[in-house]
Image (cartoon, rainbow, N blue to C red):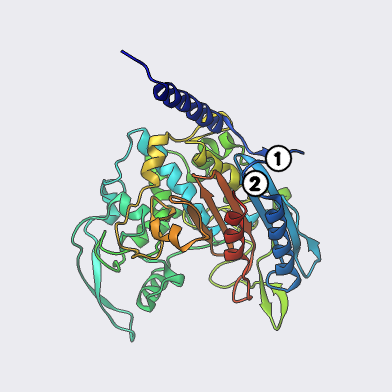
Amino acid sequence: MKLTTSFFVKAFALVLISTQVFSQIASEISPIGKQPLPGISQERIDRIDQMLDETISSNQVPGLVAMIVKDGKIVYHEAKGFANVSDQNMMAKDQIFRIASQSKAITSTAVMMLWEEGKIGLDDPISRYIPEFANPQVLTRFSYGDTSYSTRPASREIRIRDLLTHTSGLGYGMIDGNEQMKMIYNKAGIVELFTTEPVKISDNIKKLAKLPLHHDPGSKYTYSLGLDVMGYLIEIVSGMPFDEFLKTRIFDPLGMKDTGFYLNDSQGNRLVTVQRKVNGEWESYPVTFYDPDYPKTGAKTFFSGGAGLSSTALDYAKFLQMYLNGGTYNGAKILSSTTIKTIMSNQVGDLLGDGGKDYGLAFGLVDENGVAKGGIGSLGTFDWGGYFNTQYFADPVTNTIGILMKQTQGGTGDQSGWKFRQMVFSAID
């Protein structure tokens, strides 16, 4: 058989690709060093720095921490403004933030670790593990006078996949878009965020399981407490408290030393204050249906898989780099690359419309329409954000991570979120 030049070129290319993949899998996040990194423009990184300075100087936010990682190298990591305006505490790079819904990706990762071990199936009915979810009902009528309601049987049982993808029909209590569901959840005493009371997820989820659904499972996308249900599932299947499972199976192996549901005294001193703007001035956000001091005070018994974690920019970057590395980081194998392909595949069909995003297993995903719109990343870029104004994105094509952490509530005029993401991708050659 005659071996052509083309054959050797292709074979050599495969060797190079294999080498690059191995190198990527072995990588850990590290400073860029003195040499410029190919594939990213320092001049355009400087533009991002200037934009973030202007965000602070124009009083859009009191403070922030931003990080950009390219090919496992930290090309930008800066802290700006104040962690607490009233105390004049300057922001630091290792500041800890309440990441709220960024917790969902971590909880989903834990679920998929158990799935890899053959302990659950994605299409298992959740009632197999939490019997209270048997025979789900869909809301059909609601009375505002006495909050009574009627229901009908759901078309099928709620599956684990439904809970991971917000298609279960569950709602989200106080932040739900449906006023009727807000009232039903409130009357039932459902806890969804940051309580200092001695509440446990088992009690919360068992109450939630008895409440009506927005719609039949699998028929619509409704943002929900599904990942909180997954936290309780993890306890049942693993036989470990949820916080302990995350620490021993994810945080410790990845070196995420400042990530968890609750903070010790030293970490508590680095927790950024949630602030709001009143008459142009920043003040600490008061206690409402949640307590902003939750991570460092109170009973410390509630482990919300959908919104309860706190973390730093660097810690969360390690978690995202693990995904970009094909499931490995710091010498630890968290997931297989084939599992990651499943996680990063569209799981909700066309339920989100053609707005440029699909949804995987607890990650938003940029689709072809999103690429065409521009400024949000390559095909398959995965992302999400948090209730207190934190955000992340990771692009598997350019191997780029962007993280922007703030802690604000209410309208502030902040434009830095979309600008940061758009400018990061504009800096990549």
Q: Position of residue 183 (x, y in %)?
A: 39, 76
Q: Which mark is residue 119?
A: none
Considering the image in quadrants, where does the N terminus appear?
top left
Q: Which residue is mark 1?
A: 32
In terms of image quadrants, where is residue 390? Answer: bottom right
How far apart, in angstroms, are the residues tagged by discs 2 and 1?
14 Å
Q: Is residue 197 left or right of residue 169?
A: right
Residue 190 falls in image quadrant:
bottom left
Does residue 240 show up? yes
From this viewpoint, which residue is outermost toward the top?
1
Point 36% across, 61% down: residue: 207
Q: Residue at x 44, y 53 (%)?
A: 363
Q: Nearer the viewer, residue 127 or 60?
A: 60
Q: Is residue 136 left or right of residue 228?
A: left
Where is residue 392? Give x, y as percent: 55, 55
Residue 248, horizontal then vertical, whole percent: 53, 36
The answer to whether residue 238 is visible is: no
Q: Which of disc 1 and disc 2 is earlier in sequence?
A: 1
Q: Among all residues in the image, which is located at the extreme bottom? A: 145
> Is label 1 in a helix, a strand or a loop?
loop
- In the displayed structure, 264 sits above or below 213; it is above
User: Amino acid under label 1?
Assistant: Ile
Residue occupied by mark 2: 314
Of the two numbered discs 2 and 1 in the rendering, the one whose residue sits closer to the viewer: 1
Q: Which residue type does callout 2 highlight?
A: Leu
Q: Crowding at label 2, few (<14), some or many (≥20) Cα neighbours within 10 Å?
A: many
Give percent across and percent down for residue 359. Answer: 38, 55
- Determine whether 229 is above or below 329 in the image: below
Disc 2 element: helix
Q: Are marks 2 and 1 in contact (CB under 8 Å)?
A: no
Res 89 quadrant in image? bottom right
Compared with residue 255, is residue 98 higher up or lower down, i.e. above or below? below
